[in-house]
Amino acid sequence: MAPKNALPDFIKAFLVPTLINKFFMIYFGLNYSNHPGEGYGYGLAASIAFLIFTMGRFLWKYKDIEDP
């Protein structure tokens, strides 16, 4: 059985949490600190939960694959 090419999954696991999700964390975090009580905390919590979900999904998917 040929080894699975994991590079696209590594790139996806890097780009989504690092670039896209960090933008949402900074946006909601700054707006939450400037305007508390206006609902930006929910967006911040959702972006953190999405980060944990995407990284957890990646780790679960490759838990049984050994390093080459």
Image (cartoon, rainbow, N blue to C red):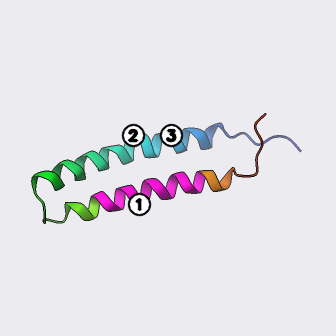
Q: Earlier in the sequence, mark 2 or mark 3?
A: 3
Residue 14, numbered label: 3
Tag 3, which secondary structure?
helix
Dots 3 and 1: beta carbons under 8 Å? no
User: Looking at the image, is mark 2 or mark 1 nearer the viewer?
Assistant: 1
The crowding category of the residue bearing disc 1, from other C-alpha atoms within 10 Å (few below 14, some 14 to 19, many at least 20), is few
Residue 15 placed where, x, y %?
A: 47, 40
Give the answer, above or below, for where 34 lies relative to 19: below
45 left or right, relative to 14: left
- The circle on residue 19 is 2
Mark 2 is surrounded, within 10 Å at the Cα level, by few (under 14), some (14 to 19) or many (20 or more) other residues, namely few
What residue span does the magenta drawing correspond to? 44-58
Say whether residue 20 is magenta. no
Q: Residue at x 35, y 44 (%)?
A: 22
Q: Which mark is residue 10?
A: none
Circles 2 and 3: CB atoms closer than 8 Å? no
- Depth-wise, is mark 3 or mark 1 nearer the camera? 1
| Callout 1: SS | helix
Instruction: State the image coordinates of residue 35 (x, y, percent, origin top left).
Output: 10, 57
Which amino acid is tagged 2? Answer: Leu
The numbered dot on residue 49 is 1
Mark-to-mark CA distance, 3 and 1: 16 Å
- Where residue 23 sits, quadrant-wise, is top left
Q: Residue 31: horizontal and vertical position, in percent? A: 16, 52
Front residue of this view, candidates 37 and 2: 37
Q: Quadrant of residue 61?
A: bottom right
Query: What residue is drawn where x is 64% and y is 56%?
Result: 60
Extreme-top residue of the structure: 68
Q: Identity of the amino acid at label 1? A: Ala
Classify 66 as above or below 57.
above
